[in-house]
Image (cartoon, rainbow, N blue to C red):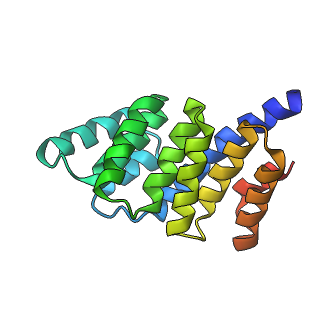
Amino acid sequence: KIKFERAFCMCYLLCIVGFLSGCSTSKANGVSEETKALLKTLKYNELVLLCEQNLKSDPNNPEYLAYLGAGHAGLKDYKLAEDALEKAITLDDKNAWYYNKRAEAYAELGEYEKGLSDANKALELDPKYTAAMTTKAKLYLASGRTKESLDSARQALAIDKNFWQATEYLV
């Protein structure tokens, strides 16, 4: 049990790191550099405020909605994160980053099957998206499916052998 709890904690931390690394390869180009910097520096309160401010003038901007969801996730308000990401996906259902972020929110809400569905959709859109593979590893591990968790981690490493976040699922 202790080994599982340690592994789950490591998975959680790695998904945050994967989340941040996913941001740098995100297709979300319609947000300011300040917005991206706030996410990368983990300034979630400021990120949420900035996104809300920008959404007042452009309420249907999927990029700001996705970053708003990321900010809420950083503040551990996963239901608000899910809601914002749902809106972003409704407006742009071709962005793998949005699906992966919502999958991470589902993981924290204990909705593992919904999370796996979103992680799989992210991979359907971007088959080499290693952050989505580690999200799948986390979801599988959380739902007690250790073999699938290992397989997802190995899949990420097969694409990028230096993707250290995935190596934590191999312990």
Query: Is residue 30 left or right of 40 when viewed as pictured?
Result: left
At horizontal 66% and vertical 51% (from top left) the residue drawn is 136
Q: Nearer the viewer, residue 126 or 170?
A: 126
Point out residue 21 in the picture as x, y percentages from the top left corner. Answer: 55, 57
Residue ranking furthest to the left:
57
Quadrant for residue 27, please give it.
bottom left
Regarding residue 34, the answer to whether it shows in the image is: no
- In this view, 89 is above or below 70: below
Regarding residue 48, the answer to whether it shows in the image is: yes
The N terminus, quarter of image: top right
Point out residue 59 in the picture as x, y percentages from the top left corner. Answer: 18, 46
Point out residue 47 in the picture as x, y percentages from the top left corner. Answer: 34, 40
At horizontal 52% and vertical 60% (from top left) the residue drawn is 122
Quadrant for residue 144, please give it.
top right
At horizontal 26% and vertical 41% (from top left) the residue drawn is 50
At horizontal 37% and vertical 59% (from top left) the residue drawn is 93
Query: Is residue 66 left or right of 171 when viewed as pictured?
Result: left
Point out residue 108 in the picture as x, y percentages from the top left corner. Answer: 57, 33
Query: Is residue 61 left or right of 105 when viewed as pictured?
Result: left
